[in-house]
Image: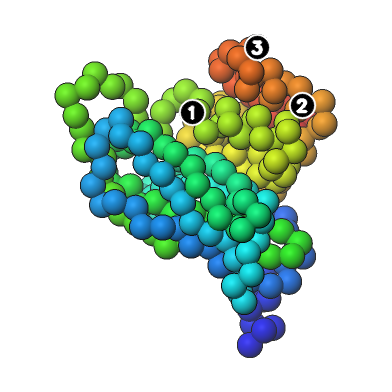
Amino acid sequence: MELRKIILTSIIFLSLGIPIAYATSYATLHLDTVSGGLRECSTVTFSGQLTSSNGTAIPHRTIFIEDDTSYLIRPNIIIAITTTDSDGKFSVPWKAVPKDNGNPFHFYAKYLGGKSFGYAKSENYESFVKHTNQSSTDVVPSKTIPVWFKNASKMWHDGQIRDIDYSWSIKNLVEHGIIKSDTVADTELKLPAWMKNNANWFAEDEISKEEYANNLQYLLNNNII
């Protein structure tokens, strides 16, 4: 049975194009219940816990909150990013905005895995974001760099998230046309250490979203990352 688990984990990573071949045990990721009906511009808090198969907390790991769009012809999109605390718990706020196609969200949490614990995905919760009379033009996905990516850039610069996590973030934006690139590698991007300075300048508003997006586009199209 344990051998089957290891083989299954390896298949999952190969299908995702994530080069993690050292997972030795399962991780369990729980996402607390998300309301089925949300109002535009209200604040939603995604919370939960990452544990090992025996219930031991897994601290200081990156958690992505995503919208499962597998039933549509386009990839899932990241909504928020956070990390687990010393108890394996996580909590991250999100300002609710509607989807650009008017469909409901299917929220879930995801952990990419690593040398000690394999990939894990949480429960899935369906929720509509109800339009209000507020003059908000935000939608998901947007064609501009979202707030969560600025947070991810700061976290990567500060060493709170791994290269593979930031690589996953960049590729998600490319898949949705937010960052323009001719090709997207199926494996982890090779991120040079000096690029962390650029990420921090963006996070600290020393360069604009447009400048950073163009910078990433150049690095991708010239195979620098």
Which residue is rendered at x = 26% and y = 52% of the image?
36
The amino acid beneath tag 2 is Met
Q: Which residue is mark 2?
A: 195
Q: Which residue is mark 3?
A: 206
**Earlier residue among tags 2 and 1:** 1
Which residue is rendered at x = 60% and y = 66% of the image?
51
**Earlier residue among tags 3 and 1:** 1
Of 44 and 186, which appears nearest the observer? 44
| Mark 3: few/some/many CA within 10 Å (<14, 14-19, 20+) | few
From the viewer's perspective, is residue 200 above or below residue 74? Answer: above
From the viewer's perspective, is residue 114 above or below residue 42? Answer: below
**What is the x, y in percent for residue 154?**
66, 29
Q: Are marks 2 and 1 in contact (CB under 8 Å)?
A: no
Which residue is rendered at x = 27% and y = 33% of the image?
40
**Earlier residue among tags 2 and 3:** 2
Q: Which residue is mark 1?
A: 146
